[in-house]
Image (tube, coloured by chain):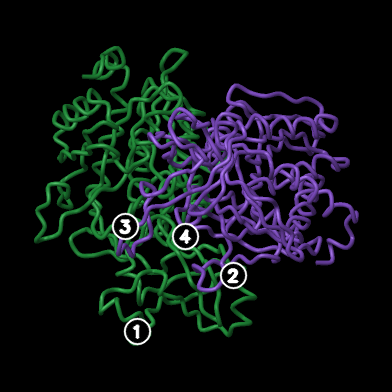
Amino acid sequence: MTIVDSLNGDTVENIKGLLRELVQIPAPAGHEGRVRQAIQEIITPHVDSIKVDALGNLIARKGRKAADGRHILLSAHMDEIGVIATHIDANGFVRFTSVGALFLRYLPGGHVRFLDGARGLVGVNIEPGQTKFPSMEQMFLDVGASNRQDCPVQVGDLAVFDRPMLEIGNRVVGKSLDNRTGVAVLIEVIRSLGESPHTFTFVFSVQEELSRQGAMTAAFASDAEMAIAVDVTTSGDTPQAARMAVSLGGGPAIKVRDQGMIADARIVRWMADSAEQAGIPHQYEVLELGTTDAQMIQVAREGIPSGCLSIPLRYLHSPAEMVDLNDLAQTYALLTRLLTGKAAF
Amino acid sequence: MATDPTMLNLNEYLTAMLSLPGIPGNEAPVRDMLARVWSPFVDEVSSSRLGSLHAIKHGGGAEPRRRVMVTAHMDGVGMMVTEIIDGFIRFTDVGSLDARVLPGQEVTVHGRRDVPGVIVDPGERLLPADLDGRAAPMRYLFIDTGLTPDALTAAVQVGDPISYALQPLALDGDWLLGHTLDNRASLAAISICLEQLRDVPHDWDVWCVATVQEETTHAGAMTSAYTIQPDMAIVLDVTYGRTGENHDPSTFPLGEGPTLGIGPNIHPVLHQRFKRLAGDLEIPYQIEVLPGNSLTDAHALQVVAGGIPCMVIGIPLLNMHTPVEVAAVKDIQQTGYLVARWIEALGKNIVEPLLAEEPA
């Protein structure tokens, strides 16, 4: 934890400030425009060029490659999971399905907010004697309407979880911390980046929560020589948790493997060596369920050796995801060190 | 190794290769060996960005020359450390393993140094009662290295690769046993093919590719194919061998020749031509129906860039993904021989009209 003390004391506050702003912006997969605009406004003064590609990725370039430099692509997805209206019944109740991997157990009683501002809550019907957890077909959104005509929601409208961000001690709780934490850390890295021998492509990607379509196309369009995704990972430190050796507060998790990819061994070593040299606490991640933008970047065109720096997070894909501010600061510190030092190869 | 670097002693060579680790993402030991073995037979050797080995033998045809990609994956299934608890290692599989065959197996944990260990089933008394005597799933198994907790955490960390440690064994009947015959058997076949092609003129450029990460994502095949943009790809992989009692039509007896795949991952005209060539040369072959995903690199490779016509050739293998995989040396030799004759014929009279022909 020493690194946090030696950082510019504003780093944690800066990241927290970014989170407060970004978490409140609804951006379900495929509809990332509003969060993209916010990110674009913040980083434009700090990069050499910036554009939005055909799928909606925000792509910024910075730096000029020195003789021993590399072209490094960094990707943080800006979309979040959500729901989409599939049917409005005669009484104005909205049936829905998921956009991204929703866990049913987190839905009943939750509040949602549609892109146009309409609000609602998740109601549920339970059969008499039912002991099984209700299915999505038994759930509906109550948006305050009493018939189809008055319903402010149409089929195809998208909504996200609606929850204010909460600070508990050194931890932050909120919706869409997957992956606004990664976005906030990457923004702070970009804003404060010093001299570097490398040139960078920063991608704030779309549709990671679906099939990582944004990363796939952004990587295809780049000629990067290596890549790092900045995302979150689940932890195994809650009671009766599935076995996983990642804890909140243990520092950034260096991905070795997840369900969709094996991180490039050279990049894993680079991350680990850099963290050790700087005394940055870190952990190793072997994730058996889930993957990140790096999965698609790795196999773009001729292949882009890729790794991932993961922020440990509890209660993934719930309206109350939790991260530790120290982990965000340490991820920032390690990422900054990686981007300003000698590259993996 | 044979003393003459351009002459292969197949058994010796395969035995050496089967003793090397190479789980997906950690293929360097195999890649280094293949680069040494293939170099004398080819004009150029290089690595892809993800670590696949490319060995190029130029053809004699007029520029721009057509390219044939002959590919076999060099990774093999293995395991990875997920957790270290009180001096024991918990692990998961990389590629798919059957947990039933794991207890009692010797393994090597590739940590800061190579650490020998054995996979242990904690015993029925310590397993959940609802398993009711059935084999313990992988999450209950652990690896005992004999090290103290402190010594273990000093040598091993989460994410370290683990490979089978069983040594290869030559069985009677010219059968070979070893833990990564999937797919080192096919790499040996490519080596034989290259040996066969020495001093043999051929029109097309031959790109022999040993791919990485087939067992997980096909990452090596799809990226190398993008680099090479071949006119045709021949994917060599193992297929299910037939055991005595089993007459499932998706299994194939050992020693009766390679299988010629047919299915949506395979260009039907390539299949027909291979069958005709094998018949002409009196090379025994078996027909393997591969409906849907062939579970080989061809599945990913077929749709790279503008699409690549693929052929899949299988070498029958017993006990796939276990430490005791078994293949017949004769099948390996015949596979290499068939692919060499195919390459020799490319652009002469057998295959030239092929690429103009429309798939059925």
Under mark 2, the amino acid is: Asp
How far apart in space, not on screen, are marks 4 and 3 (Cα)? 55 Å
How far apart in space, not on screen, are marks 1 and 2 (Cα)? 26 Å
Where residue B157 sits in the image (x, y, percent)? 60, 68
**Can you identify the residue that label 1 sits on?**
B123
Under mark 3, the amino acid is: Glu
For the residues carrying marks 1 and 3, which lies nearer the camera in this image? 3
Residue A286 lies in what quarter of the image?
bottom right
In the rendered picture, chain B carries what hue? Answer: green
**CB under 8 Å between discs 4 and 1:** no
Count residues near mark 3 (Cα–Cα under 10 Å), then give few for <14, some for 14-19, many for 20+.
few
Q: Quadrant of the C terminus of chain A?
A: top right
Please give the letter of the chain rendered in purple: A
**CB under 8 Å between discs 2 and 4:** no
Where residue A226 sits in the image (x, y, percent)? 65, 40
Q: Secondary structure at mark 2?
A: loop
Q: Earlier in the sequence, mark 4 or mark 1?
A: 4
For the residues carrying marks 4 and 1, which lies nearer the camera in this image? 1
**CB under 8 Å between discs 1 and 2:** no
Q: Residue at x 59, y 71 (%)?
A: B156
Q: Give the vertical position of B246 relative to A156 (above or below).
A: below
**Residue B22 visible in this rendered orientation of the protein:** no
